[in-house]
Amino acid sequence: LPAYIKAFPRIMELEDTQYLWRKGALSIPDTTLRNELIKCYIQHVHPSLPLINLSDFLQGFGKGGSEVAKTSLLLFQALMFAGTAYIDLSYLQTAGYSTRRDARTAFYQKTRLLYDFDFEVDRLTVVQSLLLMTYQHETPIDGKDEWHWLGIAISLIYTTGLHMDPQIYNMDVQNQRLRKRVWWSCVMRDRLLALGMRRPSRINDGDYNVPMLAIDDFEIKPLESHNLIFSSECRLVSDTTLQKELALIFISKAELCLCIGHILSTQYTSLVRDQGMEPDQEGEQGSRVNLFPKPLTKADGVNFCEAKLTNWLEKLPAPCRYVTQTPNDLQQRGSSLIIERAVLHMVYFSASTTLHRPQIMPSRESSLCHYRDLQEISWKRLREASEEITKISMDLHNLEVTRYLPATGVTILLTAITTHLLDIKITNNITRKEQARQGLSDCIQSLEELRDNYRPADDAIRFVGIALRQVDIDV
């Protein structure tokens, strides 16, 4: 193994080592591909999941790097896997992969094999790797999808004590800050996957006492790339202003995820679904527990959640506020900031949709005056959210950076598409109907751009096609 990889953490049977070698789990990409994957991880994964000390990681590639700076093989393979979603396809094709999704599957299998063989003994490292494995979005036959890996990560986090304020432990400040970032990365994955997959959150607000993140918890300093050769596009390594802005966005997203958790816990209930049903024709078994809107939601509860979202939006720091970016902005600042800021606001509007969509559904209470008022407000919020999500997606399309969206972007686009479909079907206003039709077309275009990366985009396109045929809509 290269000098920047830690030695095997435990003695393994020769047969197991040979098996891992034959399956490619012990192989490292060539230097060109490795450097490009690291660059993509730094630009497009680390800002939204800052769960390693980047300075230590990069130092490991320098001459005479310390043992602390060396990286676990499990974690390294997980980092490589995460980078495959964003690397230029030509690098993967040169390495022998026909498609991006083929490459993602191969790199994911390397990581999973190491995990399955209990290769790593350090629990924090395993948690970091599992959180990166939640970026696997192909649907496996054995049911071990992103929700599965997140569940294991959360279980390990509680047994490792990462849910406790790190100041109670006798450790240096750098490790305290790392543990806080890992914890909040886990909370964020929990809330965003729950939001997108309509599953109940596993982390409850009363189960931890880790303080909210602050700027001091992030690495805000020029980082040495050592022997890694990065292009000037990788500004995050040296641009401290960019580092601070991305840190502020991450903190704001963590705060937003607390609002999302409150919406899901107060406006939705967990119900068992598909009990006793056979797997579908593709061999996939549906989730046993999903979230469904509560049958009766009081207006006060909706208004309380709405106030939390509004308060979050009004208190956003200036670098986190959304402004349409120009090609010159892209050239000057790079794609990382543009994407992270866009995703932050897309998640906000998706949360608003999740809050208000149940309120427009017909019910016995719909005839009451105050419920009609609530429905009108909710319809207004739904339309605003779908229009803003569509606008942001088209801003990214015009800058040709849509492909850098995470898989979360797929589920968010679907929330906008659903509202556009409803508007087309039920509105009598010709202008609004045409606006919804155009918005639907724009969102489908963005989904098409994500199909190269994620299977959920395929599923979403298939769902939209069925919906369009059912309501006889042509776009």
Image (cartoon, rainbow, N blue to C red):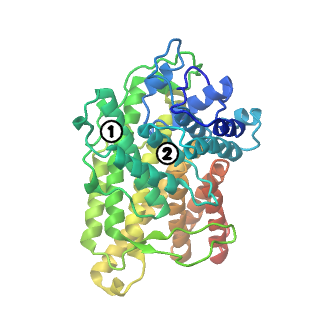
Can you identify the residue that label 2 sits on?
Answer: 130
Looking at the rendered image, the disc whose residue lies closer to the viewer, 2 or 1, is: 2
Inspect this view and state whether residue 151 appears. Answer: yes
Quadrant of the image for the C terminus?
A: bottom right
Give the structural element (helix, strand or loop) at label 1: helix
Q: Amino acid at mark 1?
A: Lys
- At x 51%, y 28%, the residue is 71
- At x 61%, y 42%, the residue is 85
Q: Amino acid at mark 2?
A: Leu
Give the structural element (helix, strand or loop) at label 2: helix
User: Relative to residue 469, is residue 207 depicted above or below?
Assistant: above
- Residue 83: image location, x then y, percent: 58, 37
Q: Residue furthest left?
A: 168
User: Relative to residue 425, is residue 79 depicted above or below?
Assistant: above
- Residue 109: image location, x then y, percent: 64, 45
Q: Are marks 2 and 1 in contact (CB under 8 Å)?
A: no
Residue placed most toward the observer, 410 or 162: 162
Can you identify the residue that label 1 sits on?
Answer: 180
Give me the disc on residue 383.
none
Residue placed most toward the observer, 92 or 315: 92
Q: Is residue 144 left or right of residue 247?
A: right
Residue placed most toward the observer, 402 or 165: 165
- At x 30%, y 39%, the residue is 213
Q: CA distance from mark 2 to mark 1?
A: 17 Å
Inspect this view and state whether residue 430 appears. Answer: no
Mark 2 vs 1, N-terminal side = 2
Residue placed most toward the observer, 110 or 368: 110
| Disc 1 packing (10 Å; few <14; some 14–19; many ≥20) | many
- Residue 4: image location, x then y, percent: 55, 22
Quadrant of the image for the N terminus?
A: top right
User: Quarter-wise, where is residue 285 in the image?
Assistant: bottom right
